[in-house]
Image (tube, rainbow, N blue to C red):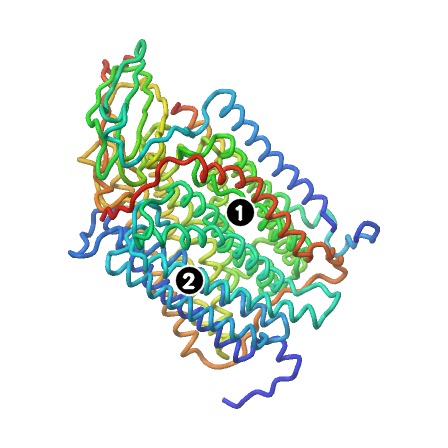
């Protein structure tokens, strides 16, 4: 193939080779982790369904730890950083600053080393503590060290993203930043504020205790610090999916952005209200008062608002675009969306899945209603809708154009068709699996539990048919996962060469200017810190001063 | 910033629904006493077996068809196991862990709480219907997590309620 | 910043052309309301 001579304008619409290589490095690790995690997942489903016994030497909870860590910490973080870097490069002129590139690679290296160390401890059955690693179950200190390296690496990459954004702003004084870059920075800001909690817990509490340098650990404090992090973690996953929905999808469907300002406001509100809410993951725990739990519940409901805004915005883009194409009637625009384009279809299923996903989330956070669902497999059903469908199908949908755009290849019609099939298979598998999980959870079946009938108890025996359905759904998902890994490998290394657009939506003509206050980061970070101090200040002081004796480390597997 | 009229309607409606949920939850929680279990009583997690009342777990009657059930949770079971109470009994569970974080849940009921070492978890439930109820651990606690369970048998004639 | 700027209604669409959007989000809202009350009544029935 001859070298294309890019005009300066075309160059700006692409991502240069240096940034592309960096992004691909992140994406390839992401999908490698995804493949391993999918294998663990299907085995779990088959075991719980009573269809398979694990070969000697592998314990169910080891698999479950691998699945959770690889899916929820590795696949996600690597994909997200790669995606964000690509979009920042794309929207700030086609390249990252040299400093950003360096930081991106250093971050990647640290993240990969941390992941490897953590995975080794899991494989050696020294860290069967699940991805929440609750004390006083004690994993190998190297598990915590691996986790810390993964987080620190992501910080370094995040600083790189911010650096390129700031360089753009210096080159373009007084201008509103590109929407993708703004949203990427918002995601990184959220991540920095959120990870402080888990970093403090891991570095100052768990690592010393797991090495034996201190005898006891304050269990409740480690849990509170984890969930201070654990809730915004899910928004760290969600916000990049929202970026794809707000910025890439309008371009893909031939439309325009609905409102640049409201989109930015939504992201700022997500930062403000996704962090001071962690007690909604601790609603049935002792040691946290009912009053503080309710404060967090109220703040959690506030975080629903930016998603309500997002729902309106997305439907508005679809309707406006559809009507411009001539669609009529109340819902005619729905039918003329490009359903046969996998770059739209996969993320769209993700968006639709977010309806039951979000509704379930509101229920989960509803204070005493949590007692109906806490630690049941309903919760697992919930996050397989949010993370494993809305976010994951969106990431898949992005990959169909992102990987070819970065590698100088094309999305062929054949892969497009295969992608539609992959999406349909994933959706059916998830409907069966997550649907069963929601129902079974209401019946009281626990999550995070290996095959059991509790001594042939009537309740547990009644659950078995649904466990079998879950296994069937899991098998379909695994087939879809394997197909996706194959698609990714093909797109990255074997697809025909050519130019693939990196779709970035534009504002409609005549759109109002975005208020400057939306880009004054110190204001919003300040409000965020203020809310965190209100929601967590007194409870954490209480958990540090009014404490029972701590717990010694215990290995229970 | 321009908010389309329909978006204003939507956000007012959505916000209103959320406020309604909060109001319902707060009345039900604080006025009707149905808040989630949130007790602050503490204990030394390494001395549970020596600390009353956990040095003698079991069922004690404290009123007319009212009981206190003191239990310990540990890898991988509960003490006591196999408990019997009459139909209509109002039972206050007081549970603590001798080791790691456990769960305590009765499927089909609202009995669902975490047992955190260092704390005493308390919850009250009235067993109106006779039958056999499973108490299981729903917080991963180790290799034997899936066998960690016990039973409460609520005695009484079928269909007879207190 | 945008207090006295004329609204470009014809670009962002008159009310009629976002009717489908309003209908769609209200359907989402209805789903949230129904599912929430479903669990609320389940909770009450179990207490």
Who is closer to the viewer here, B45 or A495? B45
Who is closer to the viewer here, B157 or A317? B157
- Which labelled disc corresponds to residue A150? 2
Q: Which element is circle 1 on?
A: loop
> Residue at position x 65%, y 60% from top?
A325
Q: Which element is circle 2 on?
A: helix
Who is closer to the viewer here, C19 or B29? B29
A77 versus A233 height, above or below: below
Residue C22 quadrant: top right
Q: Can residue B97 be seen in this snapshot?
A: yes
- How packed mark 1 is, by other alpha carbons closer than 10 Å (few <14, some 14-19, many 20 or more), is many
Residue under numbered circle 1: A275
Percent across and percent down for residue C25 are: 59, 44
Q: CA distance from mark 1 to mark 2?
A: 20 Å
Query: Which residue in the rendered view is the most extreme toward the left?
Result: A56
- Which chain letter goes with mark 1? A
> Residue at position x 40%, y 34% from top?
A284
Query: Which residue in the rendered view is the most extreme toward the bottom?
Result: A2
Q: Earlier in the sequence, mark 1 or mark 2?
A: 2
Who is closer to the viewer here, A127 or A20? A127
The reply, left or right, for residue A334 in relation to residue B132 is right
For the C terminus of chain B, the quadrant is top left
> Residue at position x 38%, y 51% from top?
A430
Percent across and percent down for residue A413 are: 47, 72
> Residue at position x 41%, y 78% from top?
A493
A40 versus A404 height, above or below: above
- Which labelled disc corresponds to residue A386? none
Q: Can residue B37 be seen in this snapshot?
A: no
A299 versus A471 height, above or below: above
């Amino acid at each position: 193939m001859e070298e294309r001579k890019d005009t300066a304008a075309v160059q700006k619409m692409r991502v240069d080779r240096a940034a592309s290589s960096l992004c691909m490095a992140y994406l390839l690790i992401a999908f490698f982790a995804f493949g391993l995690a999918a294998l663990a997942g299907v085995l779990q489903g088959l075991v719980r369904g009573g269809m398979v016994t694990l070969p000697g030497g592998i314990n169910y909870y080891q698999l479950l730890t691998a699945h959770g860590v690889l899916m929820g910490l590795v696949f996600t973080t690597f994909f997200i950083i790669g995606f964000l870097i690509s979009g920042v490069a794309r929207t700030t002129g086609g390249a990252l600053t040299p400093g950003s590139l360096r930081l991106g690679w250093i971050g990647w290296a640290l993240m990969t080393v941390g992941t490897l160390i953590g995975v080794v401890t899991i494989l050696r059955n020294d860290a069967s503590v699940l991805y929440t690693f609750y004390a006083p179950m004690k994993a190998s200190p190297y598990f915590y060290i691996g986790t810390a390296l993964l987080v620190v690496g992501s910080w370094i990459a995040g600083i790189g993203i911010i650096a390129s954004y700031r360089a753009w702003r210096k080159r373009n004084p007084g201008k509103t930043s590109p929407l993708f870059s703004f949203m990427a920075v918002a995601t990184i800001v959220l991540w920095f504020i959120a990870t402080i909690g888990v970093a403090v817990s891991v570095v100052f509490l768990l690592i010393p205790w797991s090495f034996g340098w201190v005898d006891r650990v304050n269990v409740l404090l480690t849990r509170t610090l984890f969930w201070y992090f654990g809730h915004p973690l899910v928004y760290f996953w969600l916000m990049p999916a929202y970026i794809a929905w707000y910025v890439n999808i309008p371009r893909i469907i031939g439309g325009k952005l609905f409102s640049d300002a409201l989109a930015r406001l939504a992201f700022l509100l997500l930062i403000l209200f996704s962090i001071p809410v962690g007690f909604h993951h601790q609603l049935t725990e002792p040691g946290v008062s009912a009053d503080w739990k309710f404060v967090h519940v109220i703040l959690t409901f506030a975080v629903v608002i930016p998603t309500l805004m997002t729902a309106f915005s997305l439907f508005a883009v679809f309707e406006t675009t559809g009507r411009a194409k001539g669609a009529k009637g109340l819902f005619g625009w729905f039918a003329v969306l490009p359903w046969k384009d996998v770059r739209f279809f996969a993320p769209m299923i993700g968006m639709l899945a977010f309806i039951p996903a979000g509704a379930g989330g509101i229920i989960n956070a509803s204070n005493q209603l949590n007692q109906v669902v806490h630690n049941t497999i309903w919760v697992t059903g919930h996050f397989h809708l949010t993370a494993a469908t809305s976010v994951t199908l969106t990431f898949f949908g992005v990959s169909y154009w992102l990987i070819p755009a970065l590698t100088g290849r094309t999305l062929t019609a054949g892969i497009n068709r295969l992608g539609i099939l992959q999406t349909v298979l994933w959706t059916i598998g998830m409907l069966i699996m997550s649907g069963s999980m929601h129902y079974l959870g209401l019946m009281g079946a626990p999550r995070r539990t290996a095959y059991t009938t509790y001594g042939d108890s009537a309740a547990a025996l009644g659950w078995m048919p649904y466990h079998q359905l879950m296994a069937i759904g899991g098998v379909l998902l695994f087939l879809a996962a394997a197909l996706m890994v194959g698609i990714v490998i093909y797109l990255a290394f074997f697809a025909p060469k050519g130019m693939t657009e990196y779709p970035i939506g534009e504002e409609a003509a005549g759109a109002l200017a975005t208020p400057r206050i939306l880009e004054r980061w110190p204001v919003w970070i300040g409000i965020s810190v203020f809310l965190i101090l209100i929601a967590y200040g007194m409870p954490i002081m209480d958990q540090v001063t009014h404490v029972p004796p701590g717990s010694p480390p215990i290995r229970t597997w | 910033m321009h908010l389309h009229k329909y978006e204003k309607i939507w956000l007012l409606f959505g916000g209103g629904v959320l406020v309604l949920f909060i109001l319902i939850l707060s009345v039900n929680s604080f006025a009707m006493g149905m808040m989630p279990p949130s007790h602050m009583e503490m204990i030394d997690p390494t001395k549970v077996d020596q600390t009353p009342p956990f040095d003698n777990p079991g069922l004690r009657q404290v009123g007319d068809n009212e009981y206190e059930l003191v239990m310990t949770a540990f890898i991988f079971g509960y003490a006591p196991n196999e408990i019997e109470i009459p139909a209509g009994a109002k039972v206050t569970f007081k549970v603590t862990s001798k080791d790691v974080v456990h769960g305590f849940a009765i499927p089909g009921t609202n009995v669902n709480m975490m047992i955190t070492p260092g704390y005493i978890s308390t919850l009250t439930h009235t067993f109106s219907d006779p039958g056999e109820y499973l108490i299981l651990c729903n917080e991963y606690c180790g290799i034997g997590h899936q066998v960690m369970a016990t039973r409460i048998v609520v005695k009484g004639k079928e269909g007879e309620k207190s | 910043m945008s207090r006295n700027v004329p609204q470009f209604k014809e670009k962002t669409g008159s009310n009629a052309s976002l009717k489908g959007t309003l209908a769609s989000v209200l359907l989402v809202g209805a789903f949230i309301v129904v599912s929430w009350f479903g669990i609320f009544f389940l909770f009450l029935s179990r207490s």
